Amino acid sequence: MIRGKYTDIAKLPERDGGVVVIRGHIRANRAGARVGFIEINDGTRFAGCQVVYDSVLLADAAKHPVGAAVEVEGELVFTPESRQPFEVRADKITLIGGCDADYPMQKKRHTLEFLREIPHLRARTNTFSALFRVRDTLSAAIHEYLRGEGFMYVATPIITGSDAEGAGEVFGVTAGGDSGFFDRDAKLTVSGQLHVEPFALAYDKAYTFGPTFRAENSNTPTHAAEFWMVEPEISFADLEDDMSVMEAMVKHCVSAVLERCPDEMRFFNDIIDPKRELIARLKAVTSPRFYKMTYTEAIAELERSGADFKFPVKWGLDLKTEHERFLCEQVARGPLFITDYPKEIKAFYMRQNDDGRTVAACDLLVPGVGELIGGSQREERYDILLARMREMNIPEEPLRWYTDLRRFGSVPHSGFGLGVERFLLYLTGIGNIRDTIPYARTPGRLLF
Ligand code: 4AD
Ligand code: MG
């Protein structure tokens, strides 16, 4: 963008050299007897820019500490033979904002646990700069894929009257402690699915994409109390159609991130992934078909493995992360769809299969993470849906509007939900969901 005299560091490669003015934060400052080097980063690209200054002429520059904001005027010089392809030879360095000595990020590297306590500052580190850039690219790629396929973007509510998953893991909403603001108990949404279904039934394909909230008291590296979910919903579509969209969307997003964030992905590959295989692993998922197996086959596979699981395996078990990871890491060695789960462990709205004991649901599992996507064909048959709700003690009255859709021109339809933070774990090799979202909300800790 154009802003007075400044040039974004990201735009420097497009210039022909000459005098430029840049500004940003100091990442490092090494002053020698004759020349000094400032690593300056303005956040417009992953790598910043090296500034070279004369330690005698610009003696003050040597005193500018790490973390300070400065403005640099100088000559842009291209240095294709060296590690950084360009640098700025400073004529003038002005301190814009000093930095107190207790700035917590003085060192070159900090642990992720340490940085978790300073979410307002960690965005300035390489790891989080890479992470949030990939997150931004991923969000754009999701919208782009769905819009390209003709999905309408719908803003479903965050305050709702229903527990979409029927799992009872809801946060309540009150007005200053008083729950009488609305005419019924209000909750933060656990999923926009129920509210987006009417839009898919009106506009053929629709999606919602926003924050969702779950009061699951599970302190795991893959669960957050607030996370972002994209939920596409498709009319006249069965589970197979649904899985085709999931697979194409995942592949589109993986390719987009690899293509548009090469520096960030190289960083994750070389610094975060212990085996330095991240990029190769992601490239490998963009072409072949994802594996599919039924839940019943998955159970047989787990039983046959003889592996020692914490939760014993038997038909009917709600697969845990250990089982999910075993199946995609050891059996499929890549993304894996598991389909046709027992109806007892799945939500009330999923379409019952003819066998009477499973539903047309699927999860997409990925190595290193486990469940990335949960989806299903929806029960479009009024009587069967109502009977299932009664069996599961789901109050009918609050969901009358939802069941009505099955009386007024019901059509087969399907959809899914993909957790953005889980996708980021997969894309970056970062191990903890707390490090994939700007301000993590997990049990026991609400920072800022
Ligand atoms: O499998 P889930 O619960 O499915 C639904 O909510 C459906 N209503 C989606 C739909 O069909 N429209 O959640 C979907 C995804 C999971 O696969 C996971 O990626 C993510 O949301 N997710 C979480 N991510 C982080 N922290 C949590 N506590 C999560 N719970 C679910
Ligand atoms: Mg699920």
Image (cartoon, rainbow, N blue to C red):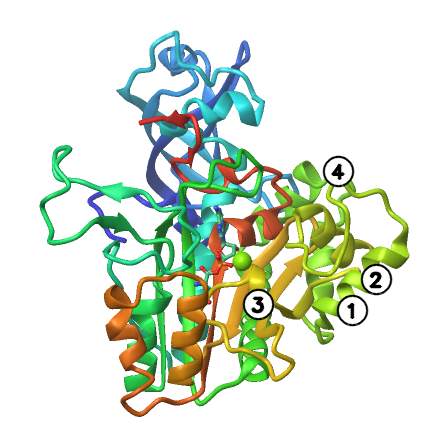
Task: Please say if the residues under marks 1 and 2 sit with CB atoms less than 8 Å apart.
Answer: yes
Three-letter residue code for mark 4: Pro
The verdict on label 3 being within 8 Å of ligand 2 is no
Within 10 angstroms of label 2, few (less than 14), some, or many (20 or more) residues?
some
Residue nearest the observer in this picture, 411 or 438? 411
Coordinates of residue 339 in the picture (x, y in percent): 65, 71
**Mark 1 vs mark 4: in front:** 1
Q: Are marks 1 and 4 in contact (CB under 8 Å)?
A: no
Q: Pick the residue in front: 187 or 48.
A: 187
Residue 223 at x, y percent in the picture: 51, 42
Q: What's the residue type where badge 2 is placed? A: Glu
Q: CA distance from mark 2 to mark 4?
A: 28 Å
**C-alpha gap between disc 1 and disc 3:** 16 Å
Kind of residue at badge 1: Glu
Spatial distance from mark 1 to mark 4, Cα to Cα? Answer: 32 Å
196 sits left or right of 234 in the view: left
> Who comes first in sequence, dot 3 or dot 4?
4
Name the residue located 34 percent from the left edge and 68 percent from the top edge. 194
Residue 298, above or below 39:
below
**Residue 26 % position (x, y):** 42, 25
Q: Indicate left or right for 103 with 272 as reference.
A: left
**Residue tagged 4:** 274
